[in-house]
Amino acid sequence: MYSPGFAPAMAFRVELTPRAQQDLDRICGWVIREAPIAGGLSFERFEKSILALSDLPERCTVEPRFSSQYRTVRKLVFGTTRYKYRIYFAVIGDVVRVVHIRHGSQKEPGRV
């Protein structure tokens, strides 16, 4: 018997805003410069974690500071203590729109 509670999760399309793409390019350049061999593998895991937002993006915490009545912004945290990144995104229909990516040592953005 079919139960709606066990329905397969809806797959979302993940898109990066130009700002998020610039953030990702900057991070990739830094990672490859700092660790030419292992950096590529690490960055690949980072990209996969962003793409994994296509399944259950609601699992990530809501960032009330950046959310409004028109848009809910969520945050995915990737990495270890020293190399932690915050990925800010909003779910709009069937699209997960990544709006900003920051290194954990950077201050919280004023606006995303």
Image (cartoon, rainbow, N blue to C red):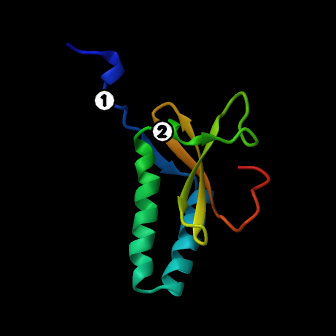
Residue 42 visible in the shown view: yes
Which residue is painted at 64% across and 35% down in the image?
72
Label 2 Cα neighbours within 10 Å, binned few <14 / some 14-19 / many ≥20: some
N-term-proximal mark, 1 vs 2 = 1
Tell me which amino acid carries mark 1.
Pro
Q: Picture coordinates of residue 56 (x, y %)?
A: 44, 38
Label 1 Cα neighbours within 10 Å, binned few <14 / some 14-19 / many ≥20: few
Q: Picture coordinates of residue 68 (x, y %)?
A: 73, 33
Residue 22 visible in the shown view: no
Q: Picture coordinates of residue 58 (x, y %)?
A: 51, 36
Q: Nearer the viewer, residue 102 or 71?
A: 102
Q: Nearer the viewer, residue 41 or 112?
A: 41
Q: Is residue 1 above or below residue 99?
A: above
Marks 1 and 2 sit apart, C-alpha to C-alpha, by: 17 Å
In the image, taking residue 103 as reference, residue 79 lies left or right, namely left
Q: Picture coordinates of residue 1 (x, y %)?
A: 19, 13
Q: Is residue 32 above or below residue 18?
A: below
Label 2 sits on residue: 95
Which residue is painted at 73% across and 42% down in the image?
66
Res 8 label: 1
Which residue is painted at 41% across and 43% down in the image?
54
